[in-house]
Amino acid sequence: MLAYTFDNTLDGLLTAVFDAFALHQAPDALIAEGDILPMFCTDVHRVRTAEDKARRVWAGLEKRLSREALRMITVAWLSEDRELPTPLLHYICKVFRQPEGAPGIERNFSDPDVLSVTNTARRVMHEKHRMMQFVRFQKTKDGTYLGVVSPDHNVLPLVVHHFRDRFGDQPWLLYDARRRYGFYYDRQEVVRITFEDEDALPFDLQTGRLSSDVISQDDQLFQDLWRTYFKAICIRQRMNPRKQLNDMPRRYWKYMTEMQ
Amino acid sequence: MLTEKTIEKLRILAESAKYDVSCSSSGTVRKGKQGMVGNTVGGVGICHSFADDGRCISLLKVMLTNYCMYDCAYCINRRSNDIPRATLSVSELEEIVMEFYRRNYIEGLFLSSGVVRTPDYTMERLTAIVRDLRTIHRFNGYIHLKSIPGASRELLNEAGRWADRMSVNIEIPREESLKLLAPEKDHQSVFQPMRLIQQGVLENKEDRRRMHHAPRFVPAGQSTQMIVGATAESDRDILGMSSALYRQPTMRRVYYSGYVSVNTYDPRLPVLKQPPLVRENRLYQADWLMRFYHFRVDEIVDEQHANLDLEVDPKLAWALRHPEAFPVDINTAEYESILRVPGIGVKSAMLIVNSRRFNRITSYHLKKMGVVMKKAKYFITCHELTDGYANPIVGINELHPERLRPLLVSASQRKKAAAELQMTLDFDEPPTDNL
């Protein structure tokens, strides 16, 4: 059995595709460096990420795949799923091995690799949607709106566009507490930010709450209003906590105003 | 400035509004605009939260006031009810909407109101709020406005310029039942505003063809709701009404609201311990079959089957009544026939027709694609002899529907259905008797 190892970047994965063709090999697995190798692994090739190789592979993909299929690959990559690299590598290799003019393999969902990558992308898009649903902003004294999240997949880059379009006239900061970075919008453009000194954060990483000296005066009132509304809108004769959990899993609750 | 009092008012008015089940914020895509707050996304819409009853919270669903001059038996806000009453001031409501929206609590506003003084007076106040939100607060998010039956055409036309969706609730599908429960209303008072809204939308379409920049009129169309279980209507009456409504070009959604006994003292209404949730669920499933699965209403319910089967979903019920339509060959059948297989949804049907051009689809692939094989295996062939190592596949035609049915109904489903039937038998005094 032949395994490739790589540095767990998308460029690294594309380089692995390049190597597989250059070396005339068909690797059985693609593993991030430091991860446990599969059993019965006899051969290991270490992929050295090279940007020019990656770019060539990507250019080839652009010629062979539709825009949606390309987007699906980048979206699936944001899943940060440990299980993704192997099927993704196989999928991309199959794309290149396809004879010219054959119907695009991207729609062959009976192929386990295509299906696996598609399903991963679908999971990421699902969580992207959940960010649009469940982000809760608090307002600071200077008028910036802060929303803290910790999604399973790295979905913030996918939702920035939505929040920019929707809240174009208010400055906001979306912060991923798990990956320790965020996007800040100053009513002009969105920039990616990280905090140098995490002890001086203006909010609590665990609860996402703004500290009392920076939160705006009336924010507490609106939070109370929202909690009151949330309780009042429920019809007690129809209690259905299972459906609630299904649609709004508990892992999102900790940053949500009405569930705190 | 908002105070503690506002919190109490919002609580009262949300409690009054919550029996209106419409919630969606879909139907129109509008990008953000310079100098305005908000956009609408279309597609499946965004639900921002889910209450303890499992229903989604997308729009701020609230009444301007819960004072009402009508006395409809099924309504919590009827004038003879002794409940706390409140009225939000225009500025209070507008501030709540804007502040909630900016914190991403809501997708927009769903505003309705009890009728005070005259329909026109009420409608005018609702219209004023929506206009203020758009022009003063520069709100570009979703607005669903309840149209007040009996309001004038001019007011509806004004309101439709600012709202995304408008709705009038039918509530009771048969007019004689409606007259019994709400003597001050008739179907005309519901269909009249519906027609006006539709006319407005169609005229607006014409206008926009000529002048591209004409403002849009109710771009997300209309919706309506019917109460289930308060009167003696069969599911055939209800679904027949829905199907007729969906033939109108602007009707986007019909909602079904399992009757919650809010006015237990009224002898015209049944006393239900629990709202008929299973029946409501079956109605939604039937609604989905009409909208996404190419079913006609007379295939779902007919004279012999005027009510939906509570134990099995309507698609499976249809399949059990029509063994001649099966088995469906997954590899050659048309998309429409594949859609009719119990256990295969729109998503997996699409995956199947896309993938079968490459190679033959087997039951292994179907399982991987998310098909519920436990159900589907009796209704399909994919040129395999067995579904396991030793069991030959036995389809609906070999087993016969009456022997297949018990295999597909779980004990818990049977129990739930029985419990709901039991309740109607015990407590339901036929309300149409005194007609």
Image (cartoon, coloured by chain):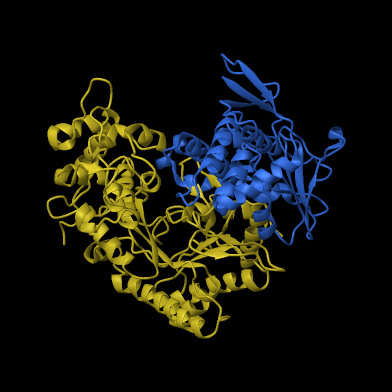
Chain colours: A blue, B yellow
Which residue is nearer to you in this view: B92 or B327? B327
Is B281 located above or below residue B137 in the figure?
A: above
Residue positioned 45% across, 41% down in the render: B53
Q: Where is residue B292 in the image (x, y as percent from the top left)?
A: 35, 55
Which residue is nearer to you in this view: B22 or B305? B305
Quadrant in the picture for the N terminus of chain B: bottom right
Q: Quadrant of residue B72?
A: bottom left
Residue positioned 58% across, 27% down in the render: A27
User: Is residue A248 visible to the viewer in this orientation of the structure?
Assistant: no
Is A228 located above or below residue B129 in the figure?
A: above
Residue positioned 26% across, 57% down in the render: B239
Q: Using residue B408 as the reference point, say whether residue B25 is left or right of it.
A: right
Q: Position of residue A108 (x, y in %)?
A: 44, 43
Residue positioned 73% across, 35% down in the render: A179
Is A210 located above or below residue B69 in the figure?
A: above
Q: Quadrant of residue B360?
A: top left
User: Is residue A227 visible to the viewer in this orientation of the structure?
Assistant: yes
Which residue is nearer to you in this view: B152 or A33? A33
Q: Which residue lies furthest to the bottom in this view?
A: B210
Q: Using residue A189 as the reference point, say whether residue B345 is left or right of it.
A: left
